[in-house]
Image (cartoon, coloured by chain):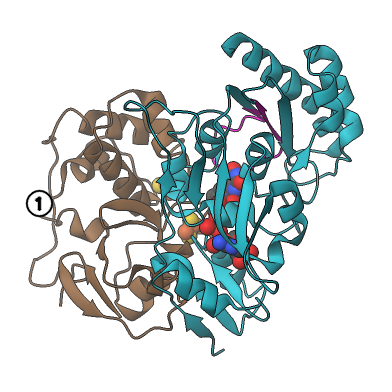
Chain colours: A brown, B cyan
């Protein structure tokens, strides 16, 4: 089987019913999608499949053979974060960060789909995502701001790029 | 664990691979089956993966754009619930109430229709809407292909491969459910109603048994929504689960029935 992960073509050798989440994390070493529940209930594993946000824990990899997968590593880099990533930093929308990759992917899909800064609509878009730290308010603020703005005032302290590993690139 | 995974590329290949259905597990969207596999709740020996079988479609003859001409709507079994949300109530509203955007994009009509009897909780909301619509289910299995009414199909759904579902667009329809702001794994109680072109009212409920149930007594009293709500309690036997108790379901059902009937009256 084959996947295009964050723009890089990858061969997949896992068994056909292996959840996409496990293929990404354990075979391809793309570790941003998190295994919160392995049952579709938390959203920590959400990645884009052909541009659409999906729970990777519930997708047998054979069902998406040939698809293009985007994880949070593929949305921006530590030195050049995407608008949503910048907004999450600017609004302190992450605490422990466990839910953040799924939230950022879902938020990006919401904004790409023309989503507005209406907080009720944003809440619906992330209603499958659980955050046990932030109380959601800062996440809603961050997503709302990213619907209107692409640059945020943040200081980027990126590690030395020669030592950065962006999941999916080899 | 070595599993034989068959991935058909058409409906006819799926039908052939399914055969008489013995010892084969169907995976459509996988939003139920993958949970069970991830937690090793069962070990299939052979799996039929429908992801590439080309059974995702809505055939809806139209007079003008967006307007149905009254003839039969047919929906393929692997159509994702997200695509059903554009349909009229009760099916559209019921599909839109399932989980969240991400799950609805993956979960299918067939998987919902054939979702297993709840070990812990119900998971086949569309069954109620399809009962209200008096839907026909085309399926294959040991005795070959056949079409039957949804109420006949549901009790033996685990022995069949559902191929498509068809129904006449209702003159009016409504859907009401127990509200939950966060997408839990299931909807504890939901009622669907539809009025056909000849004025017949049909009501279906999910979350009140092993699968969707028709509310016959409530239908008989449909002219009086208050009385119909009370009568609905004679149609079902409620059970407890993690989110709500059987007692609370009994308090809720008459209200949902009343709401659906009033909405259909207002809409007709
Ligand atoms: C977070 C979350 C929230 C959810 N919320 C809801 C909810 O609110 N309401 C609700 O109803 N459900 C809910 N579900 C359950 C589930 O997502 C839906 O019922 C969905 O429609 C199942 O479809 P699927 O294609 O993913 O099923 P699958 O997991 O692929 O299959 C489900 C069952 O149907 C069988 N099957 C699948 N397709 C066919 C076919 N064509 N013919 C015969 N058998 C078939 C399978 O063998 C299996 O037994 C939720 C799930 C999650 C993870
Ligand atoms: S790990 Fe996939 S939804 Fe929780
Ligand atoms: S930041 Fe910790 S779970 Fe959301």
Secondary-structure class at tag 1 = loop
**Vertical relation: A165 (above or below) B195:** below
Quadrant placement of the N terminus of chain B: bottom right
Subunit of mark 1? A
In the orientation shown, which residue stands out farthest toward the top? B266
Q: Is residue B200 left or right of residue B75?
A: right
List the single residue furthest toward the right: B234
Magenta-colored segment: predominant secondary structure:
loop
| Res. B130 image quadrant | top right
Residue B251 appears anywhere in the view: no
Residue A42's x, y, as percent? 50, 51
Image coords of residue B153 (percent x, y):
71, 55
Magenta residue span: B176-195
- The image shows residue A160, relative to residue A48, as above or below, that is below
Residue at position x 22%, y 45% in the image: A85
The residue indicated by pointer 1 is: A80
Q: Residue at x 72, y 51 (%)?
A: B121
In front here: B37 or B138?
B138
Disc 1 Cβ-to-ligand 3 distance below 8 Å? no
In this view, the residue in front, A41 or B33, is B33
Kindly identify the residue that appears in the image at 60 percent across and 78 percent down.
B19
Query: Is residue B180 within the magenta segment?
Result: yes
Residue A33 found in image quarter: bottom left
């Amino acid at each position: 089987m084959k996947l295009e992960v964050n723009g890089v073509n990858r061969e997949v050798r896992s068994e056909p019913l292996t959840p996409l989440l496990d293929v990404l994390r354990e075979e391809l070493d793309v570790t941003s999608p998190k295994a919160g529940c392995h049952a579709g209930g938390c959203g920590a594993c959400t990645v884009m499949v052909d541009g659409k946000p999906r729970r990777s824990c519930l997708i047998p990899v054979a069902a998406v053979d040939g698809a293009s997968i985007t994880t949070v590593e593929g949305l921006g880099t530590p030195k050049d974060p995407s608008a949503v990533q910048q907004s999450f930093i600017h609004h302190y929308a992450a605490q422990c960060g466990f839910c953040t990759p799924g939230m950022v992917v879902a938020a990006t899909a919401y904004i790409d789909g023309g989503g507005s800064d209406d907080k009720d609509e944003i809440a619906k878009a992330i209603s499958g995502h659980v955050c046990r730290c932030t109380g959601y308010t800062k996440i809603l603020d961050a997503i709302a701001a990213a619907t209107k703005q692409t640059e945020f005032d943040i200081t980027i302290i990126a590690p030395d790029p020669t030592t950065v590993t962006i999941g999916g690139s080899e | 664990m070595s599993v034989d995974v068959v991935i058909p590329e058409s409906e006819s290949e799926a039908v052939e691979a399914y055969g008489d259905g013995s010892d084969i597990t169907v995976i459509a969207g996988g939003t139920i089956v993958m949970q069970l596999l991830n937690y090793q709740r069962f070990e299939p020996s052979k799996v039929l993966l429908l992801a590439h079988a080309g059974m995702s479609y809505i055939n809806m003859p139209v007079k003008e754009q967006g307007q149905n001409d009254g003839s039969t709507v047919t929906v393929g079994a692997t159509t994702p619930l997200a695509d059903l949300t554009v349909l009229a109530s009760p099916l559209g509203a019921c599909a839109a109430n399932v989980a969240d955007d991400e799950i609805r994009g993956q979960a299918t009509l067939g998987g919902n229709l054939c979702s297993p009897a709840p070990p812990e909780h119900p998971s086949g909301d569309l069954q109620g809407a399809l009962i209200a619509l008096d839907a026909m289910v085309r399926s294959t299995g040991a005795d070959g292909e056949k079409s039957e009414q949804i109420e006949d199909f549901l009790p033996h759904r685990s022995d069949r491969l559902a191929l498509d579902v068809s129904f006449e667009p209702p003159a009016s329809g409504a859907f009401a459910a127990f509200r939950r702001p966060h997408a839990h794994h299931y909807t504890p109680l939901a009622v669907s109603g539809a009025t056909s072109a000849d004025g017949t009212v049909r009501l279906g409920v999910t979350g009140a048994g092993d699968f969707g149930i028709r509310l016959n007594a409530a239908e008989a009293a449909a002219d009086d929504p208050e009385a119909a709500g009370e009568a609905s309690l004679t149609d079902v036997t409620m059970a407890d689960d993690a989110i709500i108790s059987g007692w609370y379901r009994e308090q809720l059902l008459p209200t949902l029935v009343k709401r659906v009937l009033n909405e259909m009256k207002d809409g007709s």
